Image (cartoon, helix red, strand yellow):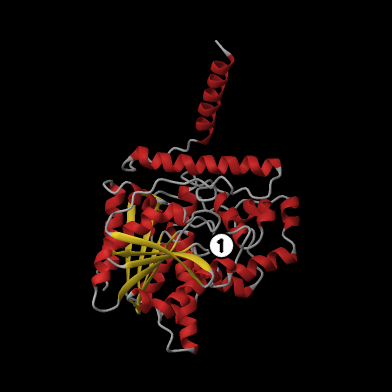
Amino acid sequence: MGTLGKITIFIGLLSVLFGYITHRPIPADIPDQWKFQILVDILSAAETVADVTDWLGYQNRWWFYPGNLDIALPVGLPPDITVEYVELAGINTVIITPKAFKSRTSPGPALVFYHGGGWVFGSLRTYMEILAMAAEETGFVVISPEYRRAPQFPFPIPYEDCLNVTLNFMKISEKFNVDPNKLVLIGDSAGGNLAMSITVTLIEMNKEDPTLPLPAMTTLIYPVLQMINFRLPSYQQNLQFLFPKLVAPKFWLAYIGYNDKLDLSHIIAENGHVNYKNETVQSFKALVNADLVPERYKSRGYNNTMATFTEDEKAMLTDEVFSHFERHYLDVRVAPLMASDEILAKMPRTHILVCEYDTLRDDGVLLFERLKKLNKDVTFQHLPDTLHGSVSLGAVFKGSHYGQQNRDLFKVVRDNF
């Protein structure tokens, strides 16, 4: 056997070993198993590379995640939409218009879609098929900003980029035959966080300026809404799927400007970052108590026993660190589930989608329960056999189970107008 053949075999064996190491099993009742397994293993591989990057001492562990590599992806777009890029508030923004929308004689609705990716990955390129499907299924204009991402641009930059693009679009919406009073703010995962945060901000701004249009609807797709309780039932039940235990805390650390303190991720996962001595913190923590999660979501059981910390770990929690966390986990622009009932009582029509096998499930559940108690117009789409990220799969595999879930989601939005 020649040298080239030996190298080929060696690379092949390494690839098999890497695939074995990064493989993460998914629940047996997940439909279209192989489709979801590929997505899970891609993200698992990205996190494995991130761990190696950390070990080597490089600064940006997120470089291998989807949307961060400069790779041109094949995208299949339907023929009945047009795609254009404009700069709004200094941010590159895509505007997708169904051809039928252009024939409207009066201004119509638009979706402002904030993409997910833990604030550290994802892009317009990786989300183009989702955005196109949203336009195709609703018949509405869809706009989406290429907001700057952490860790290079931590909070408040991603939030401010999205807010400023939204405000800018409101001012010029007539140019695209869009009614600024018919906007739907929508996002998935970290994008759901941005959609909810911006909704809350617009409600607060409207108190000062009643002429400012408010969203007609907010649609949250498996949103991340709080960073004060990482021991909710959904976190404890689903840590073996998709993202390992410490990944969500690392997303948060990158977002709040602590990408150089990723060693704190274990402490956050056990809620050690919360200053229980502060009475104000205690009152806010009550908003995300596991007792508020309906019993039907606890049927798979969960472990609510907190871990203990070593003296070295405790030493990492200085007064400055506690203060930094507190400023962020109580800030509604970061953690919109901390919004007051007074603010939530002014929420527009709201639709929330969650997945059963998702650590973020209970964030959406808790918001839904609060809005119900406030007698708000809110609907809930619980996907019992689905993992986080299903909307991405549904946009690629339109004929799959997940494609139908997407159509059901966008039908709720379309039927609101």
Residue occupying image coordinates x 43% and y 85%: 212
Residue placed furthest toward the top: 1
In the depicted view, which residue is nearer to us: 328 or 293? 328
Location of residue 23 with respect to 207 vertically, above or below: above
Apparent side of residue 283 relative to residue 358 in the rendered image (left or right): right
- Residue 243 in percent (x, y) is at 50, 47
- Quarter of the figure with the N terminus: top right
Apparent side of residue 63 relative to residue 321 in the rendered image (left or right): left
- Report the number of numbered marks: 1
- Quarter of the figure with the C terminus: bottom left
- Residue 302 in percent (x, y) is at 47, 50
Residue 62 visible in this rendered orientation of the protein: yes
Location of residue 22 with respect to 111 vertically, above or below: above
Which quadrant would residue 132 be assigned to in this image? bottom left
Residue occupying image coordinates x 46% and y 85%: 206
- Residue 108 in percent (x, y) is at 29, 75
| Residue hosting label 1 | 148
**Given the image, on which type of amino acid does mark 1 rest?**
Arg
- Residue 322 in percent (x, y) is at 69, 65
Which quadrant would residue 334 be assigned to in this image? bottom right
Provide the secondary structure element on which disc 1 rests: loop
- How many other residues sit within 10 Å of disc 1, few (<14), some (14-19) or many (≥20)? many
Residue 26 visible in this rendered orientation of the protein: no
In the depicted view, which residue is nearer to us: 356 or 404? 404
In the depicted view, which residue is nearer to us: 234 or 413? 413
